[in-house]
Image (cartoon, helix red, strand yellow):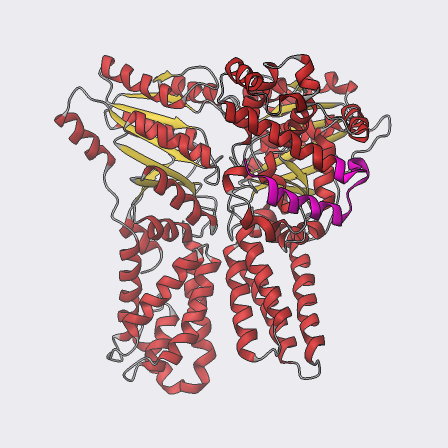
Amino acid sequence: MFEKLGEILRKVTDKVANAIFLDKDLVDSIIKDLQRALIEADVNIMLVKQLSDKIRKIAVDERIKGIEKKEHILKILHDELENILGEYKQLKIKREKNQQNRIMLLGLYGSGKTTTIAKLGNYFAKRGQKVALVGLDTHRPAAPEQLKQLAEEHKISYFIDLFEKNPAKVWKKVKDKLKDYNLILIDTAGRHTLDKVLIAEIKALEKEIKPTEIILVIPADIGQAAKKQAQEFKEVTDISGVIITRMDSTAKGGGALTACAETKAPVYFIATGEKINDLEEFNPKSFLARLLGRGDLEALLEKIRSVTDEKSQKKIQTKISEGKLSLEDVIEQVKSMNSLGGFDKIKSMIPGFSKIKEKIPESVLENQETRISKWEHIIKSMTQHEKENPEILEKQTSRIQRIAKGAGVPTSEVRSLLKQYRLLNDMVKSGGNLEMSQGLSQKQLQKFARKFGKKLRF
Amino acid sequence: MFKFLKEKITNWTKKISKEKEPEKEEKKKVVIKQKEEKEPGFFKKITEKVGKIKVSEKEFEAYGEELKMLLLENNVAFEIADKIIESLKEEIIGKEFLKKEIEFEIKECLKRIIENILVEPFNIVEKIKEKNSDQPKEPYVILFAGINGTGKTTTIAKIANYLKNSGFSCVLAAADTFRAASIEQIKKHGERLKMQVIAQQYGADPAAVGFDAIQYARKNFVNVVLIDTAGRMHTSKNLIKEIEKISRVCKPDLKFFIGEAITGNDIVEQVKSFDWAINIDGIILTKADVDERGGTILSVGHVTKKPIIFLGTGQEYDKIEPFNKNKFLKELGL
């Protein structure tokens, strides 16, 4: 996501930074690039105009000289972009005993409310909340079923009513059953345009449920209509925050993001894919850092934390410190990497990755999943001794052949797994104190990324 | 619909006429008398300002920039807005116009350009009839594709209803085997519309579901097969390959791309990818009633050179309109 926009922004900043003299032509061309990039990202036209006016003003200001001017322009650009992205606010779940958190989601048709509810439920359940999903979308055919299937798949409690058509009545029915939960996520019917009937329905629901948070769900590819949407919803109810979905497309979310900043509704999360873990907390600062190619370690670590539980992390850690990593551990690691959404999803968070990107063949980054399932079969065809000491397989063609036959894969596949194992083992040894839980230093990660770039050829 | 864009054009043009007023007060008065109230002032202004003989390049640039911003604000994608301005420039600069006719001329130019961008939509009912008379035993197969949450299933139900009212029998194929409860959703539509739904279990091969539905239609002499597919991001290569396979196996007579009328610049990327993958025949834009801006119509039309066939305008089954080019132009005030 955002590769194109990020590229242009990086180019613009490089252009400014490398310019010997900022003459009018250069400034004009920079502004033109910038305008195009932002407009293509659906950023509100007025904001784009304001931004370019500000830059132009500084560029022609005679009082600021030379190098200072460059820095000034870069700073303004950075500040303004941060402004456009809005404020950072976290979705807080209160932990007090008698306090039940009730979060209601609103949004247009097909913006992804139900999917987002399941993701949110999973997100908070992993963080130790007692979560229940309530389906009040009684309009769309099979909406409650969708919530049910998602909830069952991810083992989250849910309450739906397949026959009742009045959402307020559904709520009354399930209300008493919700006492044991401290976080209630409420799915509502999609809205088209806001007419009086719908407004009345929202208000009635609001009165009945008394939600602690009302969250608007907006898709990232929405264009210049975003602002109007956000405003309209904001007028009707007290929108406390926004979740932006479909951030994984080529869309840049500019429309949605600026709309939120303007209506002063903070963006809590962005959703970046179809899978349950594709939900990220939104932090404008680190988001901008990613956009500008500086990576975002915090988000990466947060993501890693969200998919691995502490126990298995400790286990791996002791194994790493002992310098002995079995093949099964490797698979375990790669699998959890995959539940992050694969390398493709997290690469933008690695600092400096945008610069080495060209060196990595694309085929490496995609299609990890099929490869990993093959690896699993391979490992299952090994003896216990082989699993724990994969070194003994090196140059033992007969063993490798036996395993390949057992797993139904060519021997080259077995060898590539061994190579991968060696690579990771080396990395662990050279990395030494690779303490994931306390965060990696920038240097370590860069080294890591560079190694990936060089060695990771399957 | 599209009131917004029309309003904007009118407002903007009025603004320009006002700004320039002091310069040419006398002429202006004459012009105002001549023109009707309804006619946007932009054309008036260009008329007066350059009405003598020609429009110079410099003069055009200033107006062009504003027209561009206006198009962008109304959700026309960047490259298409550029193109429109460019074509307008080519048509106008250097040509000589009579003072009285220039407003009309510019309007005509703009109209011609937009007309060129949009491809004339075909009549789906005619197409089905054609095939039915050519090969009476073969069903007419329609495939629907698009990204997540654009309203594919709802649109299919609407079109099924539309075709049913035109006297065709339909069968629905639940080839969205990925999203939770998608099969239940289309089954409910099938119940309401009293149509057969062919479905398998979740995770089944969507191409196989489509194939089954076509087989069923052949055996039972059903006229039309409508295949619903899972929403897919155009950035996901594997899913795009999957839709390619569905298209290959089912050999649809008609392939629709379904997009949202509120999508911004991204619609260009979306429709390009799908067109590249399965070579779509037509476009349906949903949620056209949500916003008054009509820019997306121009964007998709220009990028694909494929016609827009329907606009979805609401949640009920009858809220679907065949797209009419002339009506659209009229609504833009051209």
Task: State left or right for residue B20 relative to residue A155.
Answer: left
Number of numbered tags placed on the structure image: 0
Quarter holding residue A317: top right
Q: As drawn, is A126 to the left or to the right of B308?
A: right
Residue B281: x %, y % from top left: 29, 39
Q: Position of residue A208 (x, y in %)?
A: 70, 28
Foreground: A404 or B330?
A: A404
Q: Position of residue A243 (x, y in %)?
A: 64, 40
**Residue A136 visible in the picture:** yes
Query: Residue most toward the right?
Result: A97
Judge from the rendering whether residue A146 lies leftward or rightward of residue B89; answer left or right. right
**Would you say A189 lies left or right of A241 here?**
left
Residue B110 included in the magenta stretch of the image:
no
Q: Give A93 or A347, whichever is nearer the viewer.
A: A347
Question: Which quadrant would the C terminus of chain B be assigned to in this image?
Answer: bottom left
The secondary structure making up most of the magenta span is: helix
- Magenta extent: A429-458
The residue depicted at 29 percent of the width and 61 percent of the height is B113
Q: Residue at x 48, y 41 (%)?
A: B235
Rendering coords of residue A181 (x, y %): 77, 22
In the rendered image of this protein, does residue B253 appear above or below residue A253?
Answer: above
Residue B151 in sight from this viewpoint: no
In the image, is residue A239 above or below residue A355?
above
Specify whether residue A436 is painted magenta. Answer: yes
Quadrant of residue B249 in the image?
top left
**Vertical position of residue B166 compared to residue A68: above or below:** above
